[in-house]
Image (spheres, rainbow, N blue to C red):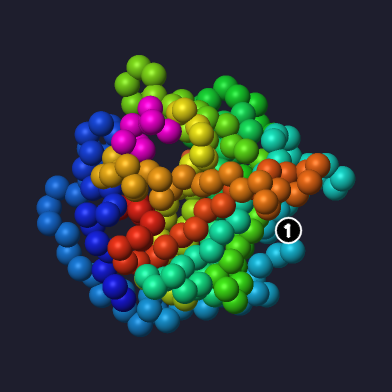
Amino acid sequence: MTPLDRTRHPPALTPGYFSSVTRAPREGLIALDPGEAGMTGPVFGSQAIGPLDDDLIRNAALPGEQAIGPRILVHGRVLDESGRGVPGALLEIWQANAGGRYRHARDGYPAPLDPNFSGFGRVLTGEDGGYRFDTVMPGAYPFPNGPNAWRPAHIHFSVFGLAFAQRLVTQMYFEGDPMIARCPIVATLPTVQAVEALTARYDPARDRPMDARAYRFDIVLRGRLATPMEP
Ligand SMILES: [Fe+2]
């Protein structure tokens, strides 16, 4: 395994993001041996993925119904440090609904839940490292970080390689969103380039006509262009 280059990723302690103060380790980090189980399992096969797992518009909807919100598709590639596609990587994605509300007991934001939307999906990358999923544009939501803090529209990504020890977690934003520059969590990213790397580009060439707008988001696992990951 290649260790993370921590200068490319947000530091654990960033007091402008209040929660990081209590979450960040106060002592030096200890390298844990992931053990044989963590290095070798689980192995994900295509059988583990259901036919609607990559369709958040329908995968939690009642028969004949769909999630409410602006329809989008998100596509891209998972790449290694030399730009080669990484096949067979499991992407798990989760997001708020179009109103900015999560289906979670601790989410107290008064925007309504959508009975046809769970906010969860997953997809395996293909032979070229490519992936695609359908969803609705998530809404912005407020969070307790001073008097007026909002999260920009975003989708959370977990990327699994072939083992638990190869899990990476990050968030994707949307090109043109004025809330990105105001978010205290985005502000933990060390450089403008890091913010750019987490911002999906509108990709009209991949729009599904009269159906969905397309956004492109590539994930680079390692190296000089590595996608920033959460500490
Ligand atoms: Fe979120």
Q: Nearer the viewer, residue 135 or 52?
A: 135
Position of residue 34 relative to residue 122, above or below, is below
Q: Position of residue 175 (x, y in %)?
A: 51, 39
Q: Is residue 105 visible?
A: no
Q: Position of residue 112 (x, y in %)?
A: 65, 26
Q: Amino acid at mark 1?
A: Leu
Residue 181 is inside the magenta segment? yes
Q: Which segment is the magenta one?
A: 180-187
Residue located 43% across and 48% down the image: 198
Q: Main secondary structure of the magenta part?
A: helix
Residue carrying label 1: 52
Position of residue 27 relative to residue 167, above or below, is above
Residue located 51% across and 47% down the image: 200
Q: Position of residue 143 (x, y in %)?
A: 42, 28
Residue located 50% across and 28% down the image: 141
Residue 98 is inside the magenta segment? no
Q: Give the farthest residue toward the top.
A: 147
SS class, disc 1: loop
Position of residue 214 relative to residue 165, above or below, is above
The answer to whether 216 appears left or right of 180 in the picture is: right
